[in-house]
Image (tube, helix red, strand yellow):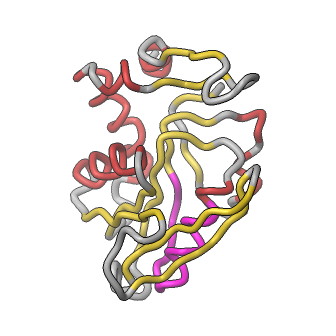
Amino acid sequence: MPATRLKSLIRDVPDFPKAGILFKDITPLLRDAAGLALAVELMANPFRGAGIHAVAGAESRGFIFGTAVAQALSCGFIPIRKKGKLPPAIKSVSYQLEYGTDTLEVRHDAIQAGQHVLMVDDLLATGGTMAACVRLMESIGAKVVGATVLIELTALKGRLALPGLAVHAPISY
C-alpha cells in the first residue's frame, strides 16, 4: 500500500516545536528518491486532466511539493510568500494564527483571471494557512479547483476551513 510506504519515511518528533506537539518530520521522505516520487504522484494524480493552469504553494514546504506537483501536471508554479519577500505589486491577506496573525503575499499578476489553480502544501492541520492561500488566490482572479497535501491531521478538522473545495491527502493521521 503506497500510504504505508510513505508513512514509513515520516519521522515523529515529540514536543517540537513546543511541548505537546507531535511533529511530522518529512525530511527522511524528501531524501528518499523513490518515496519523494511516489508522494508527488499520489498528490498529483487526482487532478490529472482537471485543466489546471498553475499550482500555488506557500513557503516553505509548499514550494517543495508545489513545484514538483506542477511539473507532474505540466503547468506552472505560483509562489505564495511571507510578507515583504516579493517585489511590488502584490496582493496580501492576513490570517489568524494560534497566537497572533501572519500575512501572505502573491504577485498581483501571478495568474490570469479565471484560470484554474491547484493549492499544494505538505500538511493540512487546522486549515488556516490553506484557507488564507485560497482567499489570496481568489483575490487575484484565480479559480481554485482543489487542494492537495501530503499529510492531513484529521483530528484538527482542517477541511472545515475549506468548504466546497476538493481536498486530497495521500496520508492521514
143 or 57, nearer to the observer: 57
Give residue 85's quadrant in the image. bottom left
Q: Per the image, is 72 magenta?
A: no
Q: Which residue is drawn at 29% across and 62% down?
A: 77
Residue 136 forms part of the magenta stretch: yes
**Viewer-nearest residue: 50 or 18:** 18
In the figure, residue 131 lies in which quadrant? Answer: bottom right
Quarter where residue 5 is shown: top left
Residue 150 image point, x, y percent: 48, 36
Residue 73 on image: x %, y %: 28, 54
Looking at the rendered image, the quarter that the C terminus falls into is top right
Please tell me which residue is depicted at 76% across the width and 50% down the height of the picture. 98
Residue at (45%, 57%) from the top-left corner?
A: 58
Is residue 158 shown left or right of residue 132? right
Residue 84 vs 57, above or below: the answer is below
**Residue 38 rendering spot, x and y as whole percentages:** 32, 28
Q: How many labels does the image show?
A: 0
Q: Which residue is drawn at 46% across and 79% down?
A: 142
**Image position of 147 (left or right of 68):** right
Task: Read off the magenta span.
Answer: 131-147
